[in-house]
Amino acid sequence: MSTRKGWRDRLAGYPNLPNVKAIPPAMRARHGEGTIATPSPAEVEDAMRGVPEGRLTTVLGIGEEIAARHRATIGCTVTTAIFAHMVAHATEEATTDTERTPYWRTLKIGGELNPKYPGSIEAQMSRLETEGHTVVQRGKRYFVEDFARKLVGTR
């Protein structure tokens, strides 16, 4: 019997989030003074679940949405990306439809596909193309063509 925690259990392991703190000194040169919102896994998952078929979001977009919700200057995109990764794996582990999140609609900054999602680029590409998106290769990386027009909240 494995003692390794499942992805859903890992997502539940952040009881002190969300929180809002001052932007750390090391980040101030880039972001200035203000506050940073660190999301909870549930907030990231809710944002990912809110993306309808045919539309997309990015980790940066989710971070900005969370910052606005908490009245912070910026959202922590690193934490958002980590939780998006965990949500994707929890979805693949899920046994019921209520635990499933359309994670493939959440892209990296710039519309790039995420090779760390379950099944790597090929699985995400297949699901996106099934929903009508066009994926293009640029060098070794893959992007959704014209992704900015397909973002949630845009026309």
Image (tube, rainbow, N blue to C red):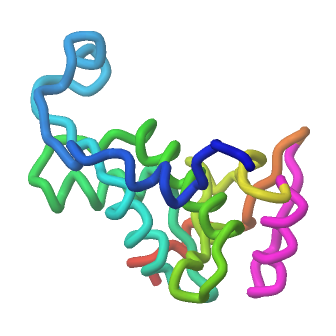
Q: Of 11 and 20, which appears nearest the observer?
A: 11
Q: Is residue 83 left or right of residue 21?
A: right
Q: How many marks?
A: 0
Q: Of 98 and 111, which appears nearest the observer?
A: 98
Q: Is residue 83 above or below residue 135?
A: above
Residue 146 visible in the shown view: no
Asked whether residue 87 is drawn in magenta, I would say: no
Q: Is residue 139 above or below residue 97?
A: above
Query: Residue 14, position in %: x, y?
Result: 32, 45
Asked whether residue 123 is drawn in magenta, I would say: yes
Residue furthest out toward the front: 1
Q: Is residue 23 left or right of residue 123?
A: left
Q: Of 150 and 71, which appears nearest the observer?
A: 71
Query: Residue 128, position in %: x, y?
Result: 76, 75
Q: Would you identify the image quadrant in which residue 24 lies? A: top left
Residue at x-position 64% and y-position 43%: 4
Residue 72 visible in the shown view: yes
Q: Is residue 113 left or right of residue 106?
A: right
Q: Is residue 105 above or below residue 84?
A: below
The span picked out in magenta is: 120-138
Residue at x-position 35% and y-position 63%: 42
Residue at x-position 82% and y-position 85%: 130
Q: Is residue 148 above or below residue 118?
A: below
Query: Residue 123, position in %: x, y?
Result: 85, 66
Q: Would you identify the image quadrant in which residue 148 lies? A: bottom right
Query: Residue 98, position in %: x, y?
Result: 51, 86
Q: Of 151 and 43, which appears nearest the observer?
A: 43
